[in-house]
């Protein structure tokens, strides 16, 4: 999702170092919040001005909602793998998450 948005914001031909700089500026918590709003069809809060008024409410197609759901699920899995030291992440788990990410895009 970040790569696609960077294509729109700064262009595909931008220097890789510049793209990397902008890619690291995305806040995943905010992205998660936006994904929840996409799934639920609720309007974004004032926290996301100036973009909130440019996004439709409840008019996202099934593919966009599926991408939003996948982002949330993948973020949860990453947090589990990174921070829940008692969880034993298997190679099968990793492959399943990779498959979800690839199918989402």
Image (cartoon, rainbow, N blue to C red):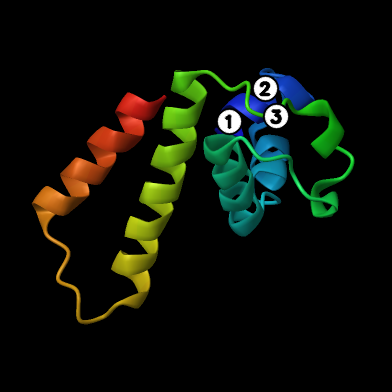
| Quadrant in the picture for residue 69 | top left
Q: Disc 2 and disc 1: Cα gap in Å?
A: 6 Å
| Quadrant in the picture for residue 75 | bottom left
| Residue 13 in picture, x, y percent from top left | 69, 18
**In the picture provided, is 80 more to the left or to the right than 20?**
left
Q: Disc 1 and disc 3: Cα gap in Å?
A: 24 Å
What residue is disc 2 on? 7
Instruction: Report helix, strand or loop for mark 1.
Output: helix
Circle 3 residues within 10 Å: few <14, some 14–19, many ≥20: some
Circle 2 residues within 10 Å: few <14, some 14–19, many ≥20: few
Instruction: Report helix, strand or loop for mark 2.
Output: helix
| Residue 51 in picture, x, y percent from top left | 83, 36
Q: For the residues carrying marks 1 and 3, which lies nearer the camera in this image?
A: 3
Image quadrant occupied by the N terminus: top right
What residue is disc 3 on? 57
Q: Are marks 2 and 1 in contact (CB under 8 Å)?
A: yes
Give the mark nearest the N terminus, 2 or 3.
Answer: 2
Q: Disc 2 and disc 3: Cα gap in Å?
A: 24 Å
Figure check: 69 above or below 90: above
| Quadrant in the picture for residue 12 | top right
Q: For the residues carrying marks 2 and 3, which lies nearer the camera in this image?
A: 3
Instruction: Report helix, strand or loop for mark 3.
Output: loop
Figure check: 85 above or below 81: below
Q: Nearer the viewer, residue 35 or 104?
A: 35
What residue is disc 1 on? 3
Q: Nearer the viewer, residue 59 or 28?
A: 59
Q: Which mark is residue 58?
A: none
Q: Residue at x 72, y 43 (%)?
A: 22
| Residue 59 in picture, x, y percent from top left | 63, 21
């Amino acid at each position: 999702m970040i790569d696609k948005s960077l294509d729109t914001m700064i262009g595909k031909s931008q220097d890789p170092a510049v793209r990397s700089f902008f890619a690291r500026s995305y806040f995943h918590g905010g992205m998660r919040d936006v994904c929840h709003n996409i799934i639920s069809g609720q309007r974004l809060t004032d926290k996301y001005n100036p973009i909130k008024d440019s996004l439709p409410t409840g008019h996202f197609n099934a593919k966009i909602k599926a991408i939003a759901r996948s982002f949330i699920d993948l973020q949860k899995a990453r947090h589990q793998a990174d921070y829940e030291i008692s969880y034993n992440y298997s190679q099968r788990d990793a492959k399943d998450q990779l498959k979800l990410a690839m199918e989402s895009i």
